[in-house]
Image (cartoon, rainbow, N blue to C red):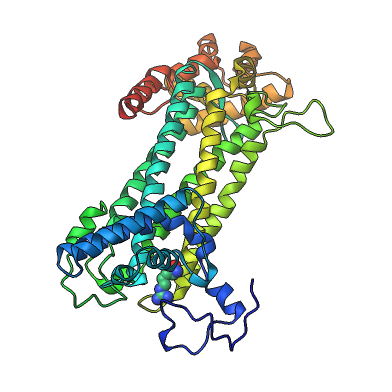
C-alpha cells in the first residue's frame, strides 16, 4: 500500500473527487474499498451496464455511436477479467468504479455517458440481485442432485431394517429407505423455499437512481426485461435500500445447511465402530497421521460444522441491516461477503454430501443386528394387547413396560420371554403375541400413508421419482 497522507493532492478520486481538495487517508481508503471482494460482481456489473446503455440509446438519451463504443469497451473488459489481465485497483474503491475507470481508458469520452440516469446505489443493488439469483439457481440444481443420490440409495433399501430412534434410543423399526426419504423431503422444501425467495428477488432496482428516481425519460420495464427480471421494483427508495432478498436467501440457506448438518451427524455416528452401519468410500474418508487403522469422516464433520458460519452470516447481515435509516448507507457494502461466503461453503458442503451418499456402502447385517436390540417391537406388543384382549392402550402400555422390565432382568429380548413368563404379568396373553415381536413384521405393518412399510415407502419413492424426472 502506498504511503498516503491527508495532504495528498494527487490521489483524488477521478469519478467523484471534483469537490475534494485531496484524497483519502490510507486507513480510510482501506476501510472504504470493497474491490477485493466485490470483483466477484464483475460479470453482473457489465451485464447491467449493457442493459442500461442499451435502454439509454433506445430512449435517445445517448447516441447509438456512444452505445456501440460502450459495448465494445465493456466486451474488452470482460475478456480482460476472464483472462486474469484486469488490474483491479483499490484507488477505484469498488467493482463499479474499476470498470467505469477502465472503460474510460479504453473508449474515452463516451464512457462518461454510461452513468447517466444511474447511481452506484441502483447499480450495486442490481448487480447483487443478479449474482444472488444465479447462485440460487445453481444451488437448486445441486439440491436436486442431492435428492437424486438419496433416491438412488433409498431404492436399494426399501426392505433394509434399521432401528428408528427417538432421543437416539431404539424406538420402532423402520427401513433405511424411509429414513433417507425424510432427507429428500427436507431438501424438497429447501428447493421450494428458494423458489419462493427467487420470486421476490427477481425484481429490478435499476433506474431507481440514488434513491429518488431520475428526470431522464428512462424505460425501467426495458432494463428489467433485458436482465431477466420479472418487473421493475415499484418504489425507488425501497429499491436501493433493502436487502431483504439477500436476508431471505441466507435464511433459506441456513435452514438447508441445518438439514445437511443433521445428515452429516448421522453419517458420523453411523460410520463409527459401535454402529458400523455404513462405510464411507475412500474418496470421502481421511486417515490419521498416527493411528494407521483410522478412517475418519472429516468431510461429514466439516459439513456438520459449516452451518455455524452459514448461520453466522445470516446473523451478521441481519445485524448490519437492523436500524438502518432509509435509503442507502455504506453499511450495506457489508452485505456481499456474507452471501459470497455462505454460497461457497454451502455448495461445497452439498456437493461433498451428495458424493458421500452416492458412494457409501451399507452394512445391512449391522443394521439388522441393531434392530434386534432394545425391545424395538414393544409398541407392537402393546398394540397386540389392545387389538386381541381389548385392553385400553394406557393399561397395555403398563403391561408392556412390566414385560420389558422382566426381559431386562433376564437380560434377553421380549421374544425370548416364555409364554408363562408373559402370563405371569397378563394371564390372557396367548402365543399369538410372538408374531408381532418380529421387527420385519412390525415394519410391514406400518403401511399408513407416509409410514415405513415397503408398500408406503414405494409410494413415496414413486412420487419423488416423478417429481425429479
Ligand atoms: N461499493 C458500494 C456497495 O457495495 C457501492 C455503492 C456505493 N454507493 C455510495 N453511495 N457510496 O455498497
Instruction: Say if residue 286 shows up in the picture.
Output: yes
Q: Position of residue 39 (x, y in %)?
A: 48, 59
User: Quarter of the image containing the C terminus?
Assistant: top left
Side of 127 where 433 appears, left or right: right
Q: Position of residue 139 (x, y in %)?
A: 42, 42
Side of 152 where 47 appears, left or right: left
User: Quarter of the image containing the N terminus?
Assistant: bottom right
Q: Nearer the viewer, residue 444 or 38?
A: 38
Write down which quadrant ligand 1 falls in: bottom left
Determine the residue located farthest toward the right in the rendered image. Answer: 290
Q: Residue at x 55, y 82 (%)?
A: 24
**Vertical placement of 63 versus 77: above or below?**
below
Q: Residue at x 56, y 35 (%)?
A: 352
Q: Residue at x 57, y 79 (%)?
A: 28
In this figure, what is the number of numbered marks?
0
Q: Nearer the viewer, residue 355 or 18?
A: 18
Q: Position of residue 134 (x, y in %)?
A: 37, 48
Determine the residue located farthest toward the top in the rendered image. Answer: 431
Q: Nearer the viewer, residue 272 or 435?
A: 272
Instruction: Say if residue 374 shows up in the picture.
Output: no
**Vertical placement of 60 versus 467: above or below?**
below
Quarter-wise, where is residue 217 in the image? Answer: bottom left
Q: Position of residue 271 (x, y in %)?
A: 66, 28
Q: Residue at x 43, y 32 (%)?
A: 145
Side of 243 where 297 appears, left or right: right
Amino acid at each position: 500500500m502506498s504511503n498516503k497522507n491527508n495532504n495528498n493532492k494527487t490521489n483524488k478520486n477521478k469519478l467523484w473527487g471534483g469537490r475534494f481538495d485531496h484524497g483519502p487517508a490510507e486507513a480510510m481508503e482501506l476501510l472504504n474499498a470493497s474491490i477485493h471482494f466485490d470483483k466477484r460482481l464483475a460479470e453482473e456489473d457489465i451485464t447491467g451496464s449493457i442493459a442500461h446503455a442499451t435502454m439509454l440509446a433506445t430512449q435517445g438519451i445517448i447516441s447509438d455511436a456512444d452505445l456501440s463504443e460502450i459495448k465494445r469497451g465493456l466486451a474488452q473488459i470482460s475478456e480482460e477479467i476472464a483472462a486474469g489481465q484486469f488490474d483491479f485497483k483499490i484507488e477505484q474503491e469498488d467493482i463499479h468504479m474499476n470498470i467505469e475507470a477502465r472503460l474510460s481508458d479504453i473508449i474515452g469520452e463516451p464512457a462518461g455517458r454510461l452513468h447517466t440516469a444511474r447511481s452506484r446505489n441502483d447499480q450495486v443493488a442490481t448487480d447483487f440481485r443478479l449474482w444472488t439469483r444465479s447462485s440460487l439457481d445453481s444451488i437448486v440444481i445441486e439440491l436436486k442432485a442431492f435428492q437424486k443420490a438419496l433416491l438412488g440409495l433409498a431404492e436399494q433399501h426399501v426392505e433394509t431394517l434399521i432401528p428408528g430412534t427417538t432421543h437416539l434410543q431404539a424406538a420402532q423399526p423402520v427401513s433405511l429407505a424411509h429414513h433417507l426419504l425424510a432427507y429428500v423431503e427436507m431438501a424438497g422444501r429447501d428447493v421450494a423455499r428458494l423458489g419462493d425467495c427467487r420470486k421476490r428477488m427477481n425484481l429490478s432496482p435499476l433506474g431507481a437512481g440514488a434513491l429518488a428516481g431520475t428526470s431522464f425519460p428512462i424505460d425501467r420495464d426495458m432494463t428489467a426485461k433485458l436482465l431477466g427480471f420479472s418487473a421493475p421494483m415499484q418504489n425507488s427508495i425501497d429499491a436501493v435500500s433493502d436487502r431483504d432478498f439477500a436476508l431471505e436467501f441466507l435464511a433459506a440457506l441456513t435452514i438447508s445447511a441445518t438439514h445437511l448438518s443433521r445428515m452429516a451427524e448421522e453419517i458420523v455416528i453411523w460410520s463409527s465402530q459401535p454402529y458400523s452401519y455404513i462405510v464411507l468410500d475412500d474418496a470421502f474418508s481421511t486417515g490419521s497421521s498416527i493411528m494407521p487403522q483410522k478412517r475418519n469422516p472429516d468431510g461429514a464433520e466439516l459439513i456438520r460444522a459449516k452451518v455455524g458460519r452459514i448461520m453466522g452470516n445470516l446473523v451478521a447481515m441481519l445485524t448490519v441491516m437492523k436500524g438502518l435509516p432509509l435509503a442507502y448507507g455504506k453499511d450495506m457494502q457489508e452485505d456481499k461477503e456474507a452471501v459470497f461466503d455462505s454460497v461457497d461453503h454451502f455448495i461445497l458442503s452439498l456437493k461433498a454430501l451428495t458424493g458421500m451418499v452416492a458412494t457409501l456402502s451399507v452394512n445391512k447385517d449391522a443394521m439388522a443386528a441393531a434392530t434386534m436390540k432394545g425391545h424395538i417391537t414393544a409398541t407392537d406388543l402393546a398394540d397386540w394387547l389392545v387389538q386381541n384382549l381389548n385392553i385400553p392402550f394406557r393399561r397395555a402400555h403398563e403391561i408392556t413396560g412390566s414385560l420389558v422390565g422382566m426381559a431386562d432382568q433376564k437380560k434377553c429380548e421380549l421374544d425370548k420371554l416364555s409364554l408363562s413368563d408373559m402370563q405371569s404379568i397378563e394371564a390372557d396373553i396367548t402365543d399369538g403375541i410372538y408374531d408381532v415381536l418380529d421387527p420385519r413384521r412390525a415394519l410391514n405393518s406400518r403401511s399408513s400413508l407416509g409410514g415405513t412399510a415397503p408398500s408406503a415407502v414405494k409410494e413415496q419413492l414413486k412420487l419423488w421419482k416423478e417429481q425429479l424426472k
